[in-house]
Amino acid sequence: MDVEQLALLAGILFILIAVVGGGFTIKEVMIPKVPGWARISALVVGILFVFPFFWVRFVAAPSGPPEGEGAQLAMIYSDNQPDRGVHGIQLNKLEVWAEHRQPRVNDRISVSFTLQNVGPNSVSFQETFVAARNPGGENRDFGYGHERLTVEPNGTVLVKANMIVDAPGIWQVWPCYILSGGQEEDYCPTRWRAFPVRVMQ
């Protein structure tokens, strides 16, 4: 269970105390009755604990096509399963859009995803980007940004990037980042949630 899940459970417990007023038992742990002022305090603390969880999933997470492009792009891939990689960084809501539902050579594709720091310490990005390999296996990484950005625990980074696919065949694409320091182990996981993009002639 990661830090985000623990915070959510703690928040739910505090909200339950605020609503019920205590006087119940959870797994052999007795929660005593609490006075009115303590119930108000428990409600405030509970909301503070659960707020980041719902903010990331329903507000801060990317949704829909990149701004201003809704009439031009169609979603061709989405992955809504949160995936905690390494360095305490979790990938949330990966979406890919293209000019056609079946991308063609020289189409533009747009990739968006959120990186969340779910660890106990701040992390410093050297940069974020979208890794890509063309059908010949050549490096076509794109969308470099967030240089030297420090993210505190529970903080998020929204990544949106575009590229032109200039060759037919199956491209491999995945979210990535480099942490400050530039060592090999400071990269995102190898082919982290990689997905194929089939490009037609």
Image: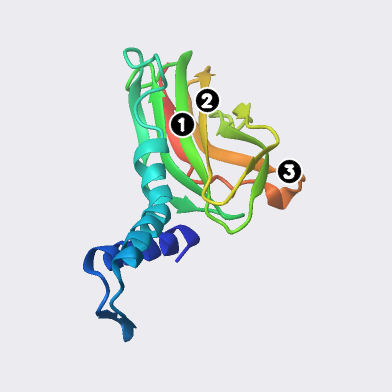
Q: Which residue is nearer to you in this view: 190 or 153?
A: 153
Q: CA distance from mark 2 to mark 1?
A: 7 Å
Q: Residue at x 60, y 48 (%)?
A: 152
Q: Amino acid at mark 1?
A: Ser
Question: In the displayed structure, does residue 13 sit left or right of residue 3?
Answer: left
Q: Amino acid at mark 2?
A: Ala
Q: Is label 1 in a helix, a strand or a loop?
A: strand
Q: Residue at x 32, y 86 (%)?
A: 28
**Label 2, residues with CA under 10 Å away: few <14, some 14-19, many ≥20:** some
Above or below, comparing residue 171 to residue 89 in the picture: above
Quarter of the figure with the N terminus: bottom left
Q: Which residue is mark 3?
A: 180
C-beta proximity under 8 Å, tags 2 and 1: yes
Q: Is label 3 in a helix, a strand or a loop?
A: loop
Q: Residue furthest left?
A: 20
Q: Which residue is mark 2?
A: 161
Q: Is residue 140 visible?
A: no
Q: CA distance from mark 2 to mark 3?
A: 21 Å
Q: Residue at x 53, y 45 (%)?
A: 155
Q: Which residue is nearer to you in this view: 150 or 133?
A: 150
**Residue 101 sits in quarter:** top left
Q: Which residue is nearer to you in this view: 77 or 167?
A: 77
Residue 95 point in image, percent of width and height: 40, 33
Q: Which residue is nearer to you in this view: 106 or 79?
A: 79
Q: Which residue is mark 1?
A: 112
